[in-house]
Image: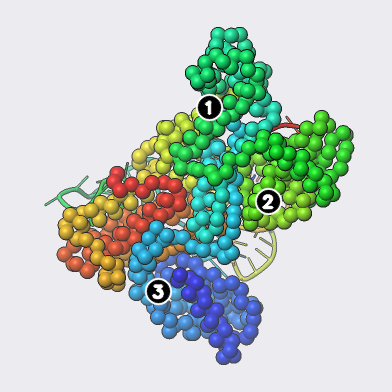
Amino acid sequence: MIQTLLADAIARAVADAQAAGAVPHFEMPPVELSRPKVPEHGDWSSQIALAAAKRAGMKPRDLANEIAGRMAEMKEIAAVEVAGPGFLNFRLSHATLTGIVGEVQEAGANWGRSRTEPAERVQVEFVSANPTGPLHLGHGRWAVVGDAIATLLEATGHRVEREFYINDFGNQMQLFGESLRARYLQENGRDADVPEGGYQGAYMRELAQELLRERGAELADAGADVFREIGRDHMLTHQRAVLERIGVRFDVWFSETELHRAGDVTHGIEQVKQHGHVYEADGAVWLRTTDFGDDKDRVIVRESGEPTYFAADIAYYLSKKSRGFDRLIYLWGADHHGYVARVRAAIQCLGDDPGTVEFLIGQLVNLKRSGQPVRMSKRTGELVTFEELVDEVGSDATRYTLLRQLSIDTPLDFDIDLVVQRSQDNPVFYVQYAHARICSIIGYARDQGVESAPVANVDLERLSHPSELELVRKIGALPDVVATAGRMRAPHRLTNFAEELAGLFHAFYRDCRVVTDDGSLTQARLHLSISTKITLANVLAFLGVTAPERM
RNA sequence: GCGCCCGUAGCUCAGUGGACAGAGCGGCGGCCUUCUAAGCCGCGGGUCGGGGGUUCGAAUCCUCCCGGGCGCGCCA
């Protein structure tokens, strides 16, 4: 890759200058290359001279000049200049630049992927909803984001497992079972009331009707826990189906109840006791999480002898740990951020390194319709489910919108009316349109009897128009963009890239006609189009969005 | 009160300590006998919430203040 080549060359130039006595010896900071915003600053730029000037005891510009003088001969570089306070600006040779078009085609579907050393085995846990109701938009956001982060990690060379933690234990589940039983009895014409604080939503009635269709009246005498189990399974099936529809698949569905049944929670409590940090007070068992920065200590076994949810969290962590991952990523909603400190503290109470565990906290989603907030409340049943949203909006637009502009730190406004519009308000179509347009051009060329020649036989150096070269530069940036997006767990960088790339393609389309009488130019532009198509398709694939051939 | 997050154009938001802070939308005005007008071009628009500090250099890091979101159970 170009930037590693340049970085190595810079390091070598510094070493040469030191050997020649032109530059004193000093410890080199890491060499970073970036793409300047303005074309006048070249294709790649490095601030190494500014960063190292102090250590070298030289003026930045002098140091930069020493480096530049030793790199001018490189065949990949057309020019290297020192600019501003001491930036090194590199302009690639025409052959190197246009050669990117060939690189892309060689890589094909792998264009944009890279390796990270060391490669890690990573688990990403996300969504992790209660099976007491349908998924809502918040869950949908985490589903899409978690999946995209997992995909990015895979694209940068890591091995990833996606896991859904099923919160199917405790009072809420019991209440859910009782509520379902009441609805079922009502459907059978019996007298029953949904308990105080129970689940009133319309979906509970539908679920009861579903049971009636499947099982008739045979459950009339069954207890709440039977309904709890059956209801749980039905809700999970529904949740899984919606997730499938937006292309999110989990490798593991992990049940909290199973954790209890297998004795792992009890075992986990024993294990944490062995590390100290545990004491008894007020009849309960506490973990001294304040030893590791938590606000207050936390109960792990209640006065009643029941383990707390937190105890299950510890057991769950131990389960993850026992499965041998190098890194654990938890993706939680903002409403759970208060738990980060205690889980992290618990990990330290177990003597483990919290550095291998990441907690990504995402902000909430405000659903709007024509600018007006849509109220969502599970209890009253007045809610827009994620499924209804996908019905109305479609998978591509849903995914894209949820991934876009998503530093997950920012609350997201999701306006249904804007998202369903097939217009400029909706960037997903802008990007998809560029892809479809390219397909159309390739089809047109074929109709004109122009088939693309093997890229090795094409004179890519015929590409010279500014719009062509800008497009090539953008295409060449994909591996770097993917690597950064993965490292920063920031999939929205890919939507930004996709929109910029689409924009540059449209500019190219405006300025440069692909199919002309000039045979070699036609081939060069056709291959530029093909490489753009590959790049767009790969980005969209990383985002889980389709790349249509026609629109 | 304490903790975490946020505050960038009228709106929604990009911006990994670097060069004059960007995009889309909205507003106005142009471009289809030529490869998809779901497109392109032009015009406007900013005390990067505010004050201090660190740095050769700050929207970015530190600190205080203002404004907003979320969280602070032996619930899950």
**Which amino acid type is marked by label 1?**
Leu
Residue A47 on image: x %, y %? 54, 72
Label 2 to label 3: alpha-carbon separation: 47 Å
Q: Which residue is mark 3?
A: A92
**Marked residue nearer the N-terminal end (3 or 1):** 3
Labels 2 and 3 within one chain: yes
Chain under disc 2: A
Residue A6 on image: x %, y %? 48, 75
Q: Please, what secondary structure does the residue beneath circle 2 have? A: helix
Look at the image and tell me whether residue A418 can be seen. Answer: no
Q: Please, what secondary structure does the residue beneath circle 3 have? A: strand
Total count of labels: 3
Q: Quadrant of the C terminus of chain A?
A: top left
**Marked residue nearer the N-terminal end (2 or 1):** 2
Select label 3 or label 1 by which is in front. Answer: 1
Identified at 82% across, 50% down, the residue is A275
